[in-house]
């Protein structure tokens, strides 16, 4: 294809085909992806007056796609769906171009405009996620209607203002998930219009004070008090009466109490749980009733009698926060925390050499408040070597000591000794993209004062880790979780890419055409690459091709990689010139 042909493609001026290719998933298992292991052909869909026809230009493959393949209709987003009759088309990391505009939308959208879609689409509180409920990017074309254009947060399309590569745009979505880690919303007060549950223990003191959260004016809709000391209970009753809200006493904590609390919240859970004193049994049971984005505030002095079973999958997926305060001032547990890494501190990325882990490391190295030391740790040496090769120049340019620490072949004692050597006082920030509870448990021995621990790994709900929570209230340690991203996170990421402060293509490890998507998803499932696989749905047949093997198949494209072998806009354009179908 000539340069003019590529220009025509970018402007979406070429005639539309009558048919297109797509990958339907008919149920759980790779054997149910496509037909006979191949994509199927279908008519290019027609669109109505309030709809857009879009072309998918690039799609990033994600481990979340693999989860859908493994779970089928048991996936939380798909339960109840008959996938045989209504198959799923995966792909939520998508760069798209408008190629058709419905009559009623012509004043708002134009053919040739480029967008990225925020995949977490909600309408009336119900999910219509792109690549899950709605047809995703592993198809050449798609129709966008009311859900994407007028959902709960308005339009879920974000315009592309600069001539970024298609890969860069597609990878905005996973990069936005990284952005979200450093902008986790947290509360310094109780949830407004929420439910607050105070639980006394055998260690409860008589001198508890409420402090700042109430003074800040956040008014819950319900206060539940269980075995609360008399002085604090009197304060709570007076405050509830002043605000005109109910206070329910549920004393003599028992198994039945937990059911009563669940019923009082109509099954939605408790927004703020305050436990007065250290009690591992109560803490474990109370945590099962935390609402999405709920907080657990442990106000205690004595150590926990034992480690606590924590559902780290819920911490991740439900954005839970575990915090606390030593003494009797309840408000100290709600003291503001950092969301960015500590400037000049020491950060540890547990399981860093996978695609999302290395993106977290790269983001940190390029951030304004970067740490002095960043430890990228993994179990597989070759993945770390690749990370170090790509990211060491960025670390050096930003004056960060990047330490690539492989645990492969290293005894546990030697590994922890090395961590103690790097950070004798512990790490200020620990981010855990490694999808095992043992990774979270292993971090507990290396917590600095006021350390923030972010559970980023996609652990399923119900995955338990055994954690000593004593540092939460005695040393100011906070546990947070992060999953997915918001439109605001995507806007921030896009702004960084368009301003030249972020190079999303740095994480690309391999490219392929739509026909290579199944093999690409297998590569994601098996950890074949340390970076991302990007699919170009419109190009001719290209199997999954690692960037370091491009020279064997597409030498002109390979010559346009960066000096470090990273994907570039120039390489992408040459790929499109060579591989797009000729007119």
Image (cartoon, rainbow, N blue to C red):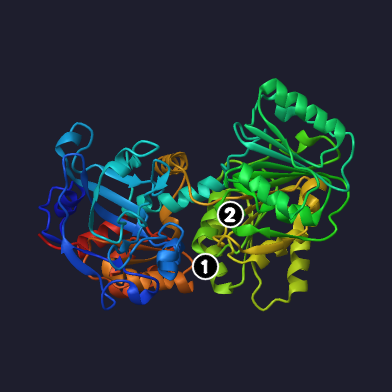
Disc 1 from disc 2: Cα separation? 27 Å
User: Is there any visible trace of residue 429 in the rendered image?
Assistant: no
In the picture of the structure, the residue carrying the numbered disc 1 is 386
Residue 122 percent coordinates (x, y): 40, 44
Q: Nearer the viewer, residue 439 or 31?
A: 31
Where is 480 relative to 535, above or below? above
User: Residue 316's mark?
Assistant: 2
For label 1, the crowd category at 10 Å Cα-Cα, with few meaning under 14, some 14 to 19 and many 20 or more, is: some
Q: Is residue 345 above or below residue 236?
A: below
Query: Of residues 306 and 86, which is closer to you in this image?
Result: 86
CB under 8 Å between callouts 1 and 2?
no
Check disc 2: other Cα within 10 Å, few if <14, some if 14-19, many if 20+: many
Where residue 513 sits: x, y (%)? 28, 66
Give the farthest residue toward the top. 242
Residue shown at 25% from the left, 70% from the top: 39
Residue drawn at the location 37% of the way across and 74% of the way down:
30
Q: Quadrant of the C terminus?
A: bottom left
Please give left or right for residue 502 compared with residue 48 in the image.
right
What x and y, as percent, mark residue 109?
A: 22, 37
Q: Position of residue 3 (x, y in %)?
A: 17, 53
The quarter of the picture where residue 466 lies is bottom right
- Report the side of 316 relative to 235 (left or right): left
Which is in the foreground here, disc 1 or disc 2? 2
Depicted 105 relative to depicted 530: above or below: above
For this rendering, which residue is in front, 93 or 544? 93
Q: Quadrant of residue 336?
A: top right
Q: Secondary structure at mark 1?
A: helix
Taking 78 as reference, is 181 left or right? right
- Check disc 2 and report its element: helix, strand or loop: helix
| Residue 259 appearing in the image | yes
Residue for point 59% across, 59% down: 313
């Amino acid at each position: 294809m000539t340069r003019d042909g590529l220009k025509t493609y970018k402007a979406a001026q070429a005639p539309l085909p009558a048919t297109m290719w797509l990958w339907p998933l008919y149920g759980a298992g790779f054997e149910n992806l496509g037909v006979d292991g191949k994509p199927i052909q279908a008519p290019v869909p027609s669109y109505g007056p309030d709809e857009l026809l879009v072309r998918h230009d690039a799609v990033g493959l994600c481990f979340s796609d693999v989860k859908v393949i493994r779970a089928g209709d048991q996936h939380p987003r798909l339960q109840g769906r008959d996938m045989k009759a209504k198959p799923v088309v995966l792909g939520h990391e998508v760069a798209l171009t408008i190629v058709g505009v419905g009559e009623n939308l012509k004043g708002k959208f134009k053919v040739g405009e480029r967008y990225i879609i925020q995949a977490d689409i909600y309408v009336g509180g119900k999910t219509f996620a792109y690549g899950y409920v709605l047809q995703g990017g592993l198809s050449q074309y798609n129709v966008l209607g009311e859900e994407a254009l007028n959902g709960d947060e308005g339009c879920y399309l974000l315009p592309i203002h600069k001539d970024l590569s298609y890969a860069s745009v597609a990878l905005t979505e996973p990069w936005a998930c990284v952005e979200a880690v450093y902008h986790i919303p947290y509360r310094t007060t109780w949830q407004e219009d929420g439910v607050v549950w105070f639980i006394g223990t055998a260690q409860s003191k008589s001198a508890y004070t409420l402090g700042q959260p109430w003074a800040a004016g956040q008014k819950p809709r319900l206060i539940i008090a269980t075995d609360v000391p008399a002085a604090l209970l009197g304060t709570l009753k007076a405050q509830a009466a002043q605000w005109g809200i109910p206070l329910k006493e549920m004393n003599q904590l028992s198994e039945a109490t937990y059911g009563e609390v669940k019923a009082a919240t109509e099954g939605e859970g408790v927004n703020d749980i305050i436990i007065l004193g250290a009690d591992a049994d109560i803490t474990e049971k109370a945590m099962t009733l935390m609402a999405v984005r709920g907080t657990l505030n442990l106000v205690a002095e004595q150590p926990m009698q034992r480690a606590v079973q924590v559902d780290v999958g819920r911490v991740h997926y439900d954005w839970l926060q575990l915090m606390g305060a030593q003494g009797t001032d309840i408000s100290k547990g709600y003291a503001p925390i950092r969301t960015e890494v500590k400037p000049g501190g020491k950060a540890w990325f547990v399981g860093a050499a996978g695609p999302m882990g290395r993106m977290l490391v790269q983001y940190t190295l390029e951030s304004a408040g970067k740490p002095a030391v960043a430890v990228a740790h993994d179990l597989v040496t070759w993945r770390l070597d690749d990370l170090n090769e790509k990211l060491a120049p960025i670390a050096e340019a930003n004056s960060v000591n990047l330490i690539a620490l492989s645990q492969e072949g290293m005894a546990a004692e030697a590994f922890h000794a090395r961590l103690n050597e790097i950070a004798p006082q512990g790490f200020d920030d620990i981010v855990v993209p490694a999808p095992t509870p043992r990774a979270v448990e292993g971090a507990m021995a290396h917590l600095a004062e006021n350390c923030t621990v972010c559970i980023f790994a996609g652990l399923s709900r119900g995955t338990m880790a055994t954690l000593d929570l004593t540092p939460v209230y005695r040393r100011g340690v906070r546990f947070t979780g992060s999953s997915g991203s918001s439109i605001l996170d995507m806007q921030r990421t896009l702004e960084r890419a368009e301003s030249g402060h972020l190079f999303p293509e740095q994480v690309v490890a391999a490219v392929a055409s739509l026909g290579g998507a199944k093999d690409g998803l297998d590569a994601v499932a098996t950890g074949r690459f340390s970076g991302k696989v990007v699919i170009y749905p419109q190009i001719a047949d290209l199997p999954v091709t690692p960037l370091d093997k491009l020279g064997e198949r597409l030498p002109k494209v390979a010559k346009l990689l960066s000096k470090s072998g990273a994907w570039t806009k120039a390489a992408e354009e040459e790929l499109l010139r060579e591989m797009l179908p000729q007119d």
